[in-house]
Amino acid sequence: MLTLLSILAIVLGYLIGSIPFGLIIVKLSTGKDMRSVESGRTGGTNAMRAAGVWAGIATAIFDIFKGVSSVWLAHALVPGNHVWLEVLAPVASILGHNYSIYLVERGDRGRLRFRGGAGGAPCVGGSIGLWPPSVLIIVPLAGLVFYFGGYASLTTISIGLLSTLVFAVRAWQGLSPWQYSLYGLISFIALAWALRPNIRRLIQGTERVVGYRARRNK
């Protein structure tokens, strides 16, 4: 059962996830509003497009910390073995990153629109918070997907899938709760949902190519 402190941990996870570090970094370094650049997202990939490699790396690091800190905060507020809270807090961080309360604007027909990123970096962070060595598996494999797969969006989606597989294997081995694999699955769904336009372009063959394939096609 969720207590008031558990609910507070989840809400704080969302609020921390909502901090648009990419927007802040790009604004401070170039004066640009990255919401008007390329995809308009506020994650590391678009920060790199708007302000260069170092801005992208800095954004990714801060966004990863969102996921890590949400798990740490959950442990600090509600000590002990609370597996579902450990799952829900980083999921809230991903949702905050993708749909930031700080980046609300009026969309078509006056509807509220929550801007943000796609969730890859905070997903990595949540996995690190649940099992720190996961970074040594997820990041290198996602890097291979980026370089040889040729699509940034596919790389982001693969992070959720890799998180699911890592924790599913660990659960099968009896090394971590099965709920951790559910964290990966929910994250995968959240990432794929945020990247619906990119998935449509992937199907149509019009998505931007990056990495090795981009070099090969020059």
Image (cartoon, rainbow, N blue to C red):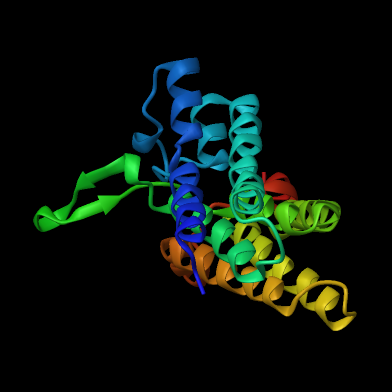
**x%, y% of residue 11?**
44, 53
Question: Which residue is situated farthest in the bottom direction here?
Answer: 172
**x%, y% of residue 121?**
62, 48
Left or right: residue 218 compared with residue 139: left
Question: Which residue is situated farthest in the left direction here?
Answer: 109
Q: Residue at x 55, y 58 (%)?
A: 89
Q: Nearer the viewer, residue 99 or 139?
A: 99
* Rendered view: 193 above or below 173: above
Q: Residue at x 61, y 49 (%)?
A: 67
Left or right: residue 172 compared with residue 213: right
Name the quarter where the C terminus is drawn: top right
Q: Nearer the viewer, residue 25 or 173?
A: 173
**x%, y% of residue 187?**
57, 66
Q: Nearer the viewer, residue 161 or 101?
A: 101
Q: Nearer the viewer, residue 117 or 211?
A: 117
Q: Residue at x 66, y 36 (%)?
A: 61
Residue 151 visible? The answer is: no
Residue 184 visible? The answer is: yes
Question: Which residue is situated farthest in the right direction here?
Answer: 173
**Residue 55 lies in quadrant:** top right
Q: Residue at x 66, y 48 (%)?
A: 72
Task: Tally the marks.
Answer: 0
* Rendered view: 184 above or below 17: below
**x%, y% of residue 208?**
54, 52
